[in-house]
Image (tube, rainbow, N blue to C red):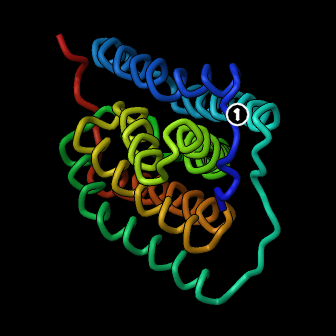
Amino acid sequence: MLEQFDGAVGVPGLLWIIFLGVLLPWSVWKNTRLSSRRPLLERGKYMAIAATQLAIFTAVGIVVAHFEHLELFPAYAFRWAHLVAGLAALALFVGVNWRRWEQKVKSGERRVHLVSPRTPRELALWTCVCVAAGVGEEILYRAVLTTLVWRITDNAAVAIVIAVVAFGLAHLHQGWSGAAVTALFALIAHALVGFTHTLVIAMVVHFTYDLIAGLRYASLVKRFGYKPAEPAT
């Protein structure tokens, strides 16, 4: 994966780098500050908006990949080692956050309200969010952004670091510690893509992790009688 690093980056690619690397993190940071002072959205509405937004970003990213001649899904030969690597990554992601999820519920972290599906409708919407994030974010960050920056810098390590930082900052709505953990997960996902030479394994891991997170939150919310904290003043 990501062998296609020859050639100059065109205007679509440059604009996409600026969007993912600068404008999106800034927008997330700004909206997070504003939302901390506002009433929480209804869960179903939030999930529908999140899934739609991710789908739109992914569609635009695929168009950019087309114009920049990026091959997102080259021929792939499955090996059992890839499955083992994917399961190991998933176990690590879940293990790192297992207690953190509980702490967030007990502390009344406001975002928990938005990502804890409690009805069949909300579970269906959350599954849509997981699909959109699992597929979309791997395309956008692990493939498109990384490859475009690699073309500019001619340095794979620099490209991966920039993509990892951009991915972490795009998750600032989880707080700085959450963004840092997300950036670590992104680094591992890059390693997984590099090892398997495909986005597919990372996509499945990403989707499964997000789904587990939502189900875990939903269980904890019921167990501890979760109440979201009041808006900041």
Residue type at mark 1 is: Gly
Residue occupied by mark 1: 61
The one of 217 and 58 positioned closer to us in this rendering? 58
The one of 1 and 177 positioned closer to us in this rendering? 1
- Vertical placement of residue 98 versus 65, above or below: below
Label 1 Cα crowd, 10 Å radius (few <14 / some 14-19 / many 20+): many
Question: Left or right: 32 with respect to 59?
Answer: left
Residue 77: % across, % down: 77, 79
- Vertical placement of residue 115 versus 81, above or below: above
Q: Is residue 213 visible?
A: yes
Residue 82: % across, % down: 60, 81
Q: Is residue 120 visible?
A: no
Question: Left or right: 155 with respect to 178?
Answer: right
Residue 1: % across, % down: 66, 62
Question: Left or right: 231 with respect to 94?
Answer: left
- Vertical placement of residue 228 versus 36, above or below: below
Residue shown at the point (37%, 71%) measured from the top left: 92
Residue 79: % across, % down: 68, 86
- Vertical placement of residue 15 versus 68, above or below: above
Question: Left or right: 14 with respect to 177?
Answer: right
Quarter of the C terminus within the rendering: top left
Residue shown at the point (79%, 62%) measured from the top left: 74
